[in-house]
């Protein structure tokens, strides 16, 4: 690059950086700066240190430890080498027999649904679905802890909503009997707390009150149920549920989402839902990777067994140490409460080479931040025992006995959210 060019570039950059920002944006930027400046690192509390070599990283949702599996990468590479045309376009233009169509048929068969719709992400599956099924006239019932993408979908649809208390089917029924039939939204396995929804009760209410049911199985598809077909399948409820949605960025270790539904709905959605129409489809090599992952998941009983053994080992270890847990799964979270407590916990854990994910508002209610450990099937007992030993040795240092969650636990309301 010539000196003249470089000088011009610098003066352009200077101008850009001094460009006036109107008050409405300035206020938002200032609020962010003020919110993070009291943290030791000057960064949001979710950003910890760099794990480096030898750390135990419990942050990924790759529950079956598949993301680096050679069969997935070789399927992707093969497709990249062979594809003579890459359909870089919206899926509305794709035909029967496309890679997307063939993968959808496999996913429908795998889960026991009539049809499946492959989406660009779990987020776009949920937002797109809500936009396609709800309107201002539709009451929507949503569990308080349901994933943000479904909340966003409600906003996009303009529907009115009624929040039911977490995992409280009686409360749901009260709301439905008062406000009338509508759409019921819940996660099967909650992404922050790791507890499981009372699916039988929720689906029973949906069916008795003529409601549409949407269950987000992002954290149970691949890890639970027969051959990993999910919790709805495990409970024999498939024929009673209208929609299952899932991110394929968890056990499927990819970058995609899926909606499982009826054949009729699958014919309607691609031409109705804005994320389906106005955002490009996945690329063939991404779909080839997902298809290879599906084979591994179907044959993954050993990995699932290991995952659940690992989860129960860590849960038991934490419970014996006096930590309060809501978890019933591979997602195991400690609740230090306010973000200042979280900062201490994060740094103390990281100094001992244990890395979890920090969840705070808006992912949790304010002052109920969580340190989430996501487990996978490849963790050894020694690694898990190390995490338990670390969490045992730091209880005083992080003030664990004073956490509200610990006090709730000791007063017999452990796991109540
Ligand atoms: C329950 C749940 N639903 C949906 C999503 C969104 O999925 P994606 O990351 O594929 O957009 C997530 C991801 O965090 C999730 O945990």
Image (cartoon, rainbow, N blue to C red):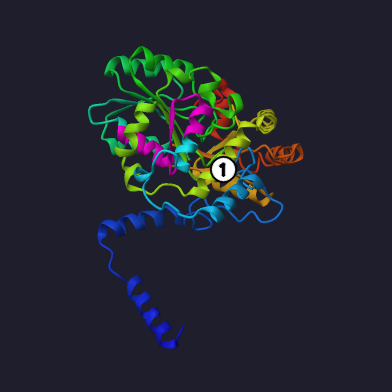
Dot 1 falls on a residue whose secondary structure is: loop
* Image location of residue 171, percent across then percent down: 39, 18
* Image location of residue 121, percent across then percent down: 44, 43
Our reading of the magenta stretch's main secondary structure is: helix
Q: Is residue 305 left or right of residue 337?
A: right
Q: Residue at x 62, y 49 (%)?
A: 74
* Image location of residue 124, percent across then percent down: 39, 41
Q: Can residue 374 be spotted in the picture?
A: yes
**Residue closest to the far left:** 137
Residue 376 in magenta stretch:
no
Q: Can residue 154 be spotted in the picture?
A: no
Q: Which residues are magenta?
A: 105-132
Front residue of 352/95: it is 95
Residue 411 figure quarter: top right
Q: Is residue 81 left or right of residue 299?
A: left
Please say if 403 is above or below 225: below
Q: Residue at x 50, y 22 (%)?
A: 232
* Image location of residue 58, percent across then percent down: 62, 43
Q: Residue at x 66, y 47 (%)?
A: 70
Front residue of 159/287: it is 287
Q: Which residue is mark 1?
A: 253
């Amino acid at each position: 690059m010539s000196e003249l060019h470089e000088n011009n570039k610098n003066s352009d950059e200077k101008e850009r950086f001094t460009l006036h920002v109107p008050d409405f944006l300035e206020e938002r930027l200032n609020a962010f700066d003020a919110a993070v400046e009291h943290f030791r690192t000057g960064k949001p509390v979710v950003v910890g240190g760099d794990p480096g070599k030898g750390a135990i990283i419990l942050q990924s949702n790759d529950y079956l430890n598949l993301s680096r599996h050679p069969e997935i990468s070789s399927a992707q590479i093969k497709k990249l080498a062979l594809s003579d045309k890459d359909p870089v376009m919206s899926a509305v233009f794709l035909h029967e027999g496309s890679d997307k169509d063939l993968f959808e048929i496999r996913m429908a068969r795998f889960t026991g649904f009539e049809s499946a719709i492959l989406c660009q992400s779990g987020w776009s599956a949920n937002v797109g679905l809500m936009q396609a099924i709800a309107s201002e006239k539709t009451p929507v019932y949503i569990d308080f802890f349901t994933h943000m993408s479904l909340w966003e979908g409600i906003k996009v649809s303009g529907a009115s909503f009624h929040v039911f208390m977490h995992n409280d089917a009686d409360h749901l029924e009260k709301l439905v009997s008062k406000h009338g039939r509508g759409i019921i939204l819940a996660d099967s396995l909650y992404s922050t707390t790791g507890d499981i929804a009372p699916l039988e009760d929720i689906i029973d209410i949906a069916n008795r009150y003529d409601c549409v049911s949407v269950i987000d199985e992002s954290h149970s598809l691949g890890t639970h149920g027969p051959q990993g077909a999910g919790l709805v399948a495990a409970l024999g409820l498939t024929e009673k549920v209208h929609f299952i949605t899932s991110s394929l960025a968890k056990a499927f270790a990819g970058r995609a989402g899926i909606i499982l539904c009826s054949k009729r709905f699958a014919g309607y959605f691609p031409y109705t839902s804005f994320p389906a129409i106005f955002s490009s489809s996945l690329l063939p090599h991404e779909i080839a990777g997902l298809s290879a992952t599906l084979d591994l998941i179907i044959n993954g009983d050993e990995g699932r067994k290991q995952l659940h053994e690992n989860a129960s080992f860590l849960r038991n270890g934490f419970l014996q140490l006096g930590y309060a847990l809501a978890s019933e799964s591979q997602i195991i979270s400690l609740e230090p409460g306010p973000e200042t407590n979280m900062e201490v916990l994060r740094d103390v854990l990281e100094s001992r080479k244990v890395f979890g994910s920090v969840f705070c508002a808006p992912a949790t209610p304010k002052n109920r931040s969580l340190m989430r450990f996501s487990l996978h099937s490849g963790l050894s007992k020694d690694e898990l025992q190390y995490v338990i030993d670390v969490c045992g040795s730091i209880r005083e240092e992080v003030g664990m006995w004073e956490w509200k969650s610990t006090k709730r636990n000791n007063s017999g309301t452990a796991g109540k959210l």
